[in-house]
Image (cartoon, helix red, strand yellow):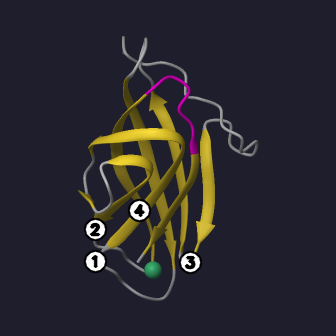
């Protein structure tokens, strides 16, 4: 675990390690669980969604917002927005039961020091 560093504390006091937001039929959490040791580098972000609805879905769209510009590196989904900016939109194709938890895995971005997540949502 040499690369592990303490997650960044964001403006949301309710969850010290990230952001937590409910929108539509998803409650979504996102937190940075790895930051670069020095300078510009990779941030790894874990995203989890909790679905609460009466329908089943095969596709989800994740929107992540940041306090500063990021450049997308990788995820388990398909990038649907510009590669660089303060907002990333990523499409996923998970089978989603009416009430279900899904882990979207890591979203990896590159940014300058001081990155924080300012918003997250999943829609279907
Ligand atoms: Zn739904």
Apparent side of residue 8 relative to residue 106 in the rendered image (left or right): right
Q: Secondary structure at mark 3?
A: loop
The quadrant of the picture occupied by the N terminus is top left
- Give the mark toward the camera: 1 or 4: 4
Q: Are marks 2 and 1 in contact (CB under 8 Å)?
A: yes
Binning the other alpha carbons within 10 Å of mark 1 as few (below 14), some (14 to 19) or many (20 upward) gives few
The dot on residue 94 is 2
Observer-nearest of 64 and 22:
64
Q: Is residue 24 magenta?
A: no
Residue range corresponding to the magenta coloring? 112-117
- Above or below residue 124? Residue 72 is above
Residue 70 sits in quarter? top left
Q: Which residue carries the number 3 mark?
A: 24
- Above or below residue 80? Residue 17 is above
- Above or below residue 81? Residue 45 is above
Q: Which residue carries the number 1 mark?
A: 58
Residue 61: x and y in percent read 37, 68
Observer-nearest of 90 and 85:
85
Residue 84: x and y in percent read 35, 45
* Among the two numbered marks 2 and 1 on one chain, the one whose residue lies closer to the N terminus: 1
Q: Which residue carries the number 4 mark?
A: 62
Q: Secondary structure at mark 1?
A: loop
The dot on residue 107 is none
The residue positioned 35% from the left and 37% from the top of the image is: 109
Q: Mark 2 and mark 4: span between their CA atoms?
A: 12 Å
Binning the other alpha carbons within 10 Å of mark 4 as few (below 14), some (14 to 19) or many (20 upward) gives many
The residue positioned 62% from the left and 60% from the top of the image is: 21
Q: Main secondary structure of the magenta part?
A: loop
* Among the two numbered marks 2 and 3 on one chain, the one whose residue lies closer to the N terminus: 3
Q: Secondary structure at mark 2?
A: loop
Observer-nearest of 69 and 8:
69
């Amino acid at each position: 675990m040499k690369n592990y560093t303490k997650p960044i504390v964001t403006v949301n006091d309710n969850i010290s390690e990230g952001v937590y937001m409910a929108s539509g039929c998803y409650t979504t959490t996102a937190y940075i669980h790895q930051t670069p040791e020095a300078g510009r580098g990779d941030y790894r972000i874990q995203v989890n969604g909790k679905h609460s609805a009466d329908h089943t879905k095969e596709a989800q769209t994740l929107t992540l917002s940041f306090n500063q510009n990021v450049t997308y590196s990788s995820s388990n989904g398909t990038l649907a927005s510009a590669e660089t900016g303060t907002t990333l939109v990523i499409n996923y194709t998970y089978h989603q039961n009416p009430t279900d938890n899904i882990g979207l895995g890591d979203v990896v971005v590159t940014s300058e020091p001081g990155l924080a997540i300012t918003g997250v949502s999943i829609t279907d």
